[in-house]
Image (cartoon, helix red, strand yellow):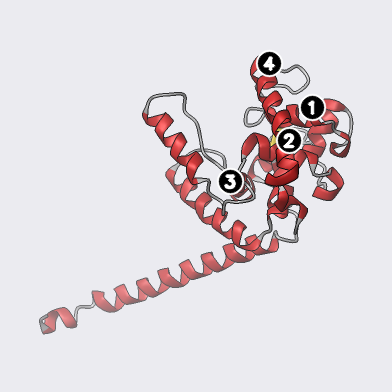
């Protein structure tokens, strides 16, 4: 390296910019960690979708309810319908992701491999539109959620922020809207039908189910006993 290179005026500037960028990155990471950690005890006041609906003047139905008050049945049904290995994985279901990739490569109907933890990361901390940036951030927040939250808390937040229809958020609001009763009083069949309209709640209905919803609800209903006895064990422990 020549003296000219060593004395280049751009080198101090580069060092300063690098220091600023590293400091900014550390601050962002630190704030995101605190954000996720706080929601271990604090219920998220809103989500991107809820904020969008309210900003657009739409009436939003949401009643935040603890998992204990909802009863565990709806949580078990969500595991059976959405994420069979919820209690065992650490945020990512490798087998489901592999199957989804294989199906997509083979040209079959596009399918995803998102776990309930990933859906919580997207619903609570991010936005719904697909992009590589959002997927990367989703993975990051999923790791933080699994690190700081219990599985019970992840399920509780999921069941309170999931979209269940036009302006309907959370299992409690959905239960009252569709079945005119609290989530705690849902029968196994009703719980199975409610989770079976996910992830297309604006397209399907639990009270006027299509053949596809009925079929999925039957499978969820059959799986409930196993989930309640063994697979869903993490919901019984905090």
Task: Identify the image quadrant of the C terminus.
Answer: bottom right
What residue is at 52 percent from the left and 69 percent from the top? 27
Residue tagged by mark 3? 122
Q: Is residue 107 left or right of residue 10?
A: right
Residue tagged by mark 4? 210
Which quadrant of the structure image shows residue 8? bottom left
Point out the frontmost of discs 4 and 1: 1
* In this view, 149 is above or below 3: above
Counting residues from the start of the chain, the first of labels 4 and 2 encountered is 4
Q: How far apart, in angstroms, are the residues tagged by discs 1 and 3?
A: 28 Å
> Counting other residues with Cα less than 10 Å from the Cα at mark 2, is it few (<14), some (14-19), or many (20 or more)?
many
Q: Position of residue 152 (x, y in %)?
A: 73, 53
Q: Is residue 165 visible?
A: no
Counting residues from the start of the chain, the first of labels 4 and 1 encountered is 1
Q: How far apart, in angstroms, are the residues tagged by discs 3 and 4?
A: 28 Å
> Counting other residues with Cα less than 10 Å from the Cα at mark 4, is it few (<14), some (14-19), or many (20 or more)?
some
């Amino acid at each position: 390296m020549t003296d000219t290179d060593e004395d280049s005026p751009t080198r101090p500037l580069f060092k300063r910019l690098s220091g600023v960028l590293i400091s900014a990155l550390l601050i962002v990471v630190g704030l995101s960690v605190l954000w996720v950690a706080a929601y271990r005890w604090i219920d998220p006041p809103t989500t991107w979708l809820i904020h969008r609906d309210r900003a657009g003047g739409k009436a939003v139905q949401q009643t935040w309810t603890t998992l204990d008050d909802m009863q565990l049945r709806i949580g078990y049904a969500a595991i059976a319908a959405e994420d069979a290995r919820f209690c065992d994985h650490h945020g990512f279901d490798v087998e489901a992701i592999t199957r989804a990739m294989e199906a997509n490569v083979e040209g079959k109907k596009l399918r995803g491999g998102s776990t309930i933890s990933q859906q919580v990361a997207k619903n609570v901390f991010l936005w719904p539109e697909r992009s590589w940036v959002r997927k990367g951030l989703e993975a990051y927040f999923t790791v933080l959620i699994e690190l700081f939250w219990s599985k019970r808390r992840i399920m509780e937040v999921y069941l309170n922020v999931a979209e269940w229809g036009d302006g309907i958020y959370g299992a409690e609001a959905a239960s009252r809207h569709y079945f005119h009763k609290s989530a705690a009083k849902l029968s196994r069949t009703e719980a199975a039908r409610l989770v079976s309209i996910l992830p297309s709640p604006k397209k399907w209905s639990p009270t006027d189910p299509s053949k596809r919803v009925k079929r999925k609800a039957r499978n969820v209903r059959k799986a409930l006993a196993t989930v309640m006895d063994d697979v869903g064990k993490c919901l019984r422990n905090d």
